[in-house]
Image: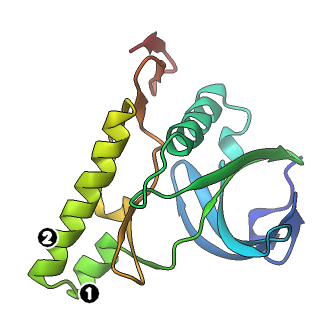
Amino acid sequence: MHFLSRCAMIGNVISHYRILEKLGEGGMGVVYKAEDLKLTRTIALKFLPPGLIAHEPGRARFLQEARASAALNHPGICTIYDIVEQDGELFIAMEFIEGRTLRERIIEGRMRPADAIECAIQIAEALQEAHNKGIVHRDIKPENIIINTKNQAKVMDFGLAKLKGSLKLTKSSATFRI
């Protein structure tokens, strides 16, 4: 049984997190803004979609995302706090970043050339840090970059990351060592 229907999650508590609002949804998860009741801070929770909870390759990719991100400590990469499995749900607790995606900023036309160059440098530095740790993101796109309120770029969503020495998870459910 899943914690609650996804539309009824707002206002409820799972583990020690109160769900505040839905932020977005993609192929590998649904993201909510939440309050960490123990540390009294705002965070984001990324839930594995209900259809993938029993799907072992999907679970493995989700766990790989958490591990890849958690292995990194860089101001340009979203911080992972925890991965939790409770009440039939699997989710990642991570840094909440107030801001807009790079895609939204591009569409709004709100980036000066100097800001775009600075953003590109910040993204490159974050990716270099990941590469130094043997992690290749493999899904860099404007939707996976958030520009925070201080104009700092944050790389998100390491769901397709390749970790040196780990098993590669393919869509055909095959695995092989990298």
Amino acid on which disc 2 is placed: Ile
Quick one: SS at disc 1? helix
Work out which quarter of the rendered image holds the C terminus and state it: top left
Report the side of 117 relative to 137 (left or right): left
The residue under label 1 is 108
Amino acid on which disc 1 is placed: Glu
User: Which color mode does the image show?
Assistant: rainbow
In the image, residue 38 above or below residue 134: below
Q: Quadrant of residue 8?
A: bottom right
Depth check: 111 or 130 in front?
130
Q: Earlier in the sequence, mark 1 or mark 2?
A: 1
Quick one: SS at disc 2? helix
Task: Select label 1 or label 2 by which is in front.
Answer: 2
In the image, residue 75 above or below residue 69: below
Depth check: 112 or 74 in front?
74
* Residue 140 visible here: no
In the image, residue 114 above or below residue 165: below
Report the side of 91 relative to 131 (left or right): right
CA–CA distance between discs 1 and 2? 17 Å
Marks 1 and 2 close (CB-CB < 8 Å):
no
At x 77%, y 46%, the residue is 84
**Could you say which disc has been placed on residue 117 in the image?**
2
Q: Quadrant of residue 59?
A: top right
- Residue 6 is situated, as x and y percent measured from the top left of the image, at 75, 64
- Residue 74 is situated, as x and y percent measured from the top left of the image, at 43, 54
- Residue 60 is situated, as x and y percent measured from the top left of the image, at 61, 30
Depth check: 41 or 10 in front?
41
At x 44%, y 17%, the residue is 165
At x 70%, y 49%, the residue is 82
* Residue 147 visible here: yes
- Residue 47 is situated, as x and y percent measured from the top left of the image, at 68, 53
At x 42%, y 61%, the residue is 75
